[in-house]
Amino acid sequence: MLPEQNVSGSLYGDKKFIRQLKDNDKDGVINIRDKCKNTPLNAKVDNKGCHKTIPHKLYVELKVFFETDSTEIRFQYYKEIKKLADFMKDNPSSKVVIEGHTDNSGRQSYNQSLSYKRAQAIADILIQSFKISAKRVKAIGYSESRPIASNASAEGKKKNRRVVAEISIQTKIDINRWDIYSVDDPQ
Protein backbone atom coordinates (compact mmCIF):
# COMPACT_ATOMS: atom_id res chain seq x y z
CA MET A 1 0.00 0.00 0.00
CA LEU A 2 1.35 3.42 -0.99
CA PRO A 3 1.64 6.17 1.56
CA GLU A 4 -0.98 8.88 1.42
CA GLN A 5 0.11 12.02 -0.49
CA ASN A 6 -0.91 15.57 0.26
CA VAL A 7 -1.90 17.70 -2.71
CA SER A 8 -2.10 21.45 -2.28
CA GLY A 9 -4.11 23.80 -4.44
CA SER A 10 -3.79 27.41 -5.43
CA LEU A 11 -5.43 30.17 -3.45
CA TYR A 12 -6.47 31.68 -6.78
CA GLY A 13 -8.12 28.60 -8.20
CA ASP A 14 -6.38 25.62 -9.70
CA LYS A 15 -7.33 26.28 -13.33
CA LYS A 16 -5.84 29.77 -13.39
CA PHE A 17 -2.71 28.62 -11.59
CA ILE A 18 -2.12 25.71 -13.99
CA ARG A 19 -2.72 27.93 -17.04
CA GLN A 20 -0.09 30.43 -15.82
CA LEU A 21 2.51 27.67 -15.33
CA LYS A 22 2.07 26.33 -18.85
CA ASP A 23 4.46 27.20 -21.64
CA ASN A 24 2.15 27.45 -24.64
CA ASP A 25 4.82 28.41 -27.18
CA LYS A 26 7.33 25.92 -25.71
CA ASP A 27 10.16 28.45 -25.47
CA GLY A 28 11.10 27.50 -21.91
CA VAL A 29 9.41 30.51 -20.28
CA ILE A 30 6.11 29.99 -18.45
CA ASN A 31 3.09 31.95 -19.67
CA ILE A 32 2.90 34.26 -16.66
CA ARG A 33 6.46 35.50 -17.35
CA ASP A 34 6.33 35.32 -21.17
CA LYS A 35 6.25 38.81 -22.71
CA CYS A 36 6.51 37.48 -26.29
CA LYS A 37 3.82 34.87 -26.64
CA ASN A 38 4.51 33.30 -30.04
CA THR A 39 8.24 32.73 -30.39
CA PRO A 40 9.20 30.07 -32.96
CA LEU A 41 9.85 26.55 -31.72
CA ASN A 42 13.48 26.07 -30.56
CA ALA A 43 14.24 29.79 -30.74
CA LYS A 44 16.83 31.13 -28.31
CA VAL A 45 15.04 33.62 -26.04
CA ASP A 46 15.84 35.85 -23.09
CA ASN A 47 14.31 35.43 -19.62
CA LYS A 48 11.13 37.17 -20.78
CA GLY A 49 10.60 34.77 -23.69
CA CYS A 50 11.63 37.31 -26.36
CA HIS A 51 14.18 37.06 -29.15
CA LYS A 52 17.41 38.76 -28.39
CA THR A 53 18.19 41.82 -30.47
CA ILE A 54 21.65 42.40 -31.78
CA PRO A 55 23.05 45.42 -33.56
CA HIS A 56 24.05 44.95 -37.17
CA LYS A 57 26.53 47.46 -38.50
CA LEU A 58 26.64 48.36 -42.15
CA TYR A 59 29.39 50.50 -43.58
CA VAL A 60 28.32 52.64 -46.48
CA GLU A 61 30.94 54.53 -48.40
CA LEU A 62 29.11 57.66 -49.43
CA LYS A 63 30.31 58.89 -52.78
CA VAL A 64 30.75 62.39 -51.39
CA PHE A 65 34.17 63.94 -51.86
CA PHE A 66 35.50 67.33 -50.86
CA GLU A 67 37.86 69.85 -52.34
CA THR A 68 41.03 70.57 -50.36
CA ASP A 69 40.28 72.52 -47.18
CA SER A 70 36.53 72.53 -47.87
CA THR A 71 33.35 71.37 -46.16
CA GLU A 72 31.10 72.38 -49.03
CA ILE A 73 28.89 69.60 -50.34
CA ARG A 74 28.28 70.03 -54.04
CA PHE A 75 24.75 69.52 -55.33
CA GLN A 76 25.76 66.44 -57.36
CA TYR A 77 26.24 64.52 -54.07
CA TYR A 78 22.71 65.02 -52.74
CA LYS A 79 21.60 61.79 -54.49
CA GLU A 80 24.05 59.84 -52.34
CA ILE A 81 22.79 61.46 -49.17
CA LYS A 82 19.18 60.87 -50.24
CA LYS A 83 19.88 57.12 -50.62
CA LEU A 84 21.09 57.06 -47.02
CA ALA A 85 18.07 59.06 -45.83
CA ASP A 86 15.67 56.75 -47.69
CA PHE A 87 17.32 53.71 -46.12
CA MET A 88 16.96 55.26 -42.66
CA LYS A 89 13.29 56.09 -43.30
CA ASP A 90 12.68 52.50 -44.39
CA ASN A 91 14.45 51.25 -41.23
CA PRO A 92 13.17 53.43 -38.37
CA SER A 93 15.31 51.67 -35.75
CA SER A 94 18.51 52.53 -37.62
CA LYS A 95 21.06 55.05 -36.43
CA VAL A 96 24.00 56.45 -38.33
CA VAL A 97 27.44 57.72 -37.45
CA ILE A 98 28.85 59.94 -40.17
CA GLU A 99 32.64 59.68 -40.21
CA GLY A 100 34.58 62.55 -41.75
CA HIS A 101 38.11 62.09 -43.15
CA THR A 102 40.86 64.27 -44.60
CA ASP A 103 44.11 63.81 -46.44
CA ASN A 104 47.36 64.58 -44.63
CA SER A 105 47.75 68.15 -45.90
CA GLY A 106 48.02 70.62 -43.03
CA ARG A 107 48.28 70.22 -39.28
CA GLN A 108 46.63 67.23 -37.62
CA SER A 109 44.67 69.45 -35.21
CA TYR A 110 43.27 71.48 -38.12
CA ASN A 111 42.42 68.30 -40.03
CA GLN A 112 40.62 66.95 -36.98
CA SER A 113 38.33 69.98 -36.96
CA LEU A 114 37.91 69.89 -40.75
CA SER A 115 36.97 66.18 -40.77
CA TYR A 116 34.35 66.77 -38.05
CA LYS A 117 32.88 69.71 -39.99
CA ARG A 118 32.61 67.53 -43.11
CA ALA A 119 30.74 64.85 -41.17
CA GLN A 120 28.52 67.46 -39.53
CA ALA A 121 27.68 68.96 -42.94
CA ILE A 122 26.29 65.57 -44.03
CA ALA A 123 24.49 65.14 -40.70
CA ASP A 124 22.89 68.57 -41.08
CA ILE A 125 21.55 67.67 -44.53
CA LEU A 126 20.08 64.41 -43.19
CA ILE A 127 18.42 66.25 -40.33
CA GLN A 128 17.32 69.47 -42.02
CA SER A 129 16.65 68.47 -45.63
CA PHE A 130 15.55 64.85 -45.21
CA LYS A 131 13.93 65.16 -41.75
CA ILE A 132 15.88 62.36 -40.04
CA SER A 133 15.70 62.78 -36.26
CA ALA A 134 18.86 64.32 -34.78
CA LYS A 135 18.77 61.56 -32.13
CA ARG A 136 19.55 59.06 -34.91
CA VAL A 137 22.49 60.95 -36.44
CA LYS A 138 25.97 61.50 -35.04
CA ALA A 139 29.00 63.14 -36.64
CA ILE A 140 32.61 62.27 -35.84
CA GLY A 141 35.90 63.37 -37.37
CA TYR A 142 38.91 61.10 -37.87
CA SER A 143 41.31 63.61 -39.42
CA GLU A 144 43.88 61.84 -41.63
CA SER A 145 44.16 58.82 -39.30
CA ARG A 146 42.24 56.37 -41.54
CA PRO A 147 43.40 56.79 -45.14
CA ILE A 148 42.05 54.48 -47.83
CA ALA A 149 44.69 55.51 -50.36
CA SER A 150 48.24 56.80 -50.33
CA ASN A 151 48.62 60.48 -49.53
CA ALA A 152 51.71 60.53 -51.79
CA SER A 153 49.62 61.35 -54.89
CA ALA A 154 46.93 63.91 -55.70
CA GLU A 155 44.52 61.08 -56.63
CA GLY A 156 45.13 59.32 -53.30
CA LYS A 157 44.58 62.55 -51.36
CA LYS A 158 41.31 63.11 -53.23
CA LYS A 159 40.08 59.63 -52.19
CA ASN A 160 40.95 60.32 -48.55
CA ARG A 161 38.83 63.52 -48.41
CA ARG A 162 35.61 61.60 -47.87
CA VAL A 163 32.79 60.67 -45.53
CA VAL A 164 31.62 57.21 -44.49
CA ALA A 165 28.26 56.31 -42.99
CA GLU A 166 28.24 53.58 -40.34
CA ILE A 167 24.64 52.44 -39.94
CA SER A 168 23.54 50.32 -37.02
CA ILE A 169 20.23 48.52 -36.90
CA GLN A 170 18.66 46.61 -34.02
CA THR A 171 17.06 43.50 -35.45
CA LYS A 172 15.45 40.41 -34.02
CA ILE A 173 17.07 37.21 -35.05
CA ASP A 174 15.93 33.64 -34.71
CA ILE A 175 18.79 31.76 -33.10
CA ASN A 176 17.96 28.17 -32.42
CA ARG A 177 18.96 26.74 -29.09
CA TRP A 178 21.73 24.23 -29.26
CA ASP A 179 20.72 20.65 -28.66
CA ILE A 180 22.29 17.23 -29.15
CA TYR A 181 21.29 17.27 -32.83
CA SER A 182 22.71 20.75 -33.60
CA VAL A 183 25.55 20.98 -36.07
CA ASP A 184 28.02 23.86 -36.14
CA ASP A 185 28.11 25.82 -39.38
CA PRO A 186 31.27 24.95 -41.30
CA GLN A 187 33.01 28.20 -42.13
Image: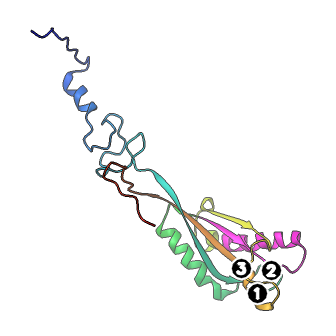
Assess whether mark 2 and mark 3 are in contact (beta carbons under 8 angstroms).
Answer: no
Assess whether mark 1 and mark 3 are in contact (beta carbons under 8 angstroms).
Answer: no
Q: Which of pointers 3 and 1 lies earlier in the amino acid sequence?
A: 3
Q: Which of pointers 3 and 2 lies earlier in the amino acid sequence?
A: 2
Per the image, the residue denoted by label 2 is 103
In this view, 152 is above or below 99:
below
Q: Is residue 45 left or right of residue 65?
A: left
Q: Quadrant of residue 69?
A: bottom right
Per the image, the residue denoted by label 1 is 156
Badge 1: few (under 14), some or many (20 or more) residues near its Cα, within 10 Å? some
Question: Which residues make up the magenta segment?
Answer: 96-124
Q: Which of pointers 1 and 2 lies earlier in the amino acid sequence?
A: 2
Residue drawn at x 40%, y 40% is 48
Residue type (three-letter) at the residue carrying disc 2: Asp
Question: Is residue 26 magenta-colored?
Answer: no
Residue type (three-letter) at the residue carrying disc 3: Ile
Badge 2: few (under 14), some or many (20 or more) residues near its Cα, within 10 Å? many
Badge 3: few (under 14), some or many (20 or more) residues near its Cα, within 10 Å? some
Q: Is residue 109 left or right of residue 60?
A: right
Q: Quadrant of residue 168?
A: bottom right
In this view, 124 is above or below 47:
below
Estimate the x, y position of residue 37 in percent, counting from the top left: 31, 45
Assess whether mark 2 and mark 1 are in contact (beta carbons under 8 angstroms).
Answer: yes
Residue drawn at x 35%, y 51% is 43
Q: What element does badge 1 sit on?
A: helix
Estimate the x, y position of residue 167 in percent, counting from the top left: 57, 67
Estimate the x, y position of residue 109 in percent, counting from the top left: 88, 68
Q: Nearer the viewer, residue 159 or 117?
A: 159
Estimate the x, y position of residue 138 in percent, counting from the top left: 67, 63
Q: Is residue 134 left or right of residue 173?
A: right
Per the image, the residue denoted by label 3 is 148
Q: Quadrant of residue 82?
A: bottom right
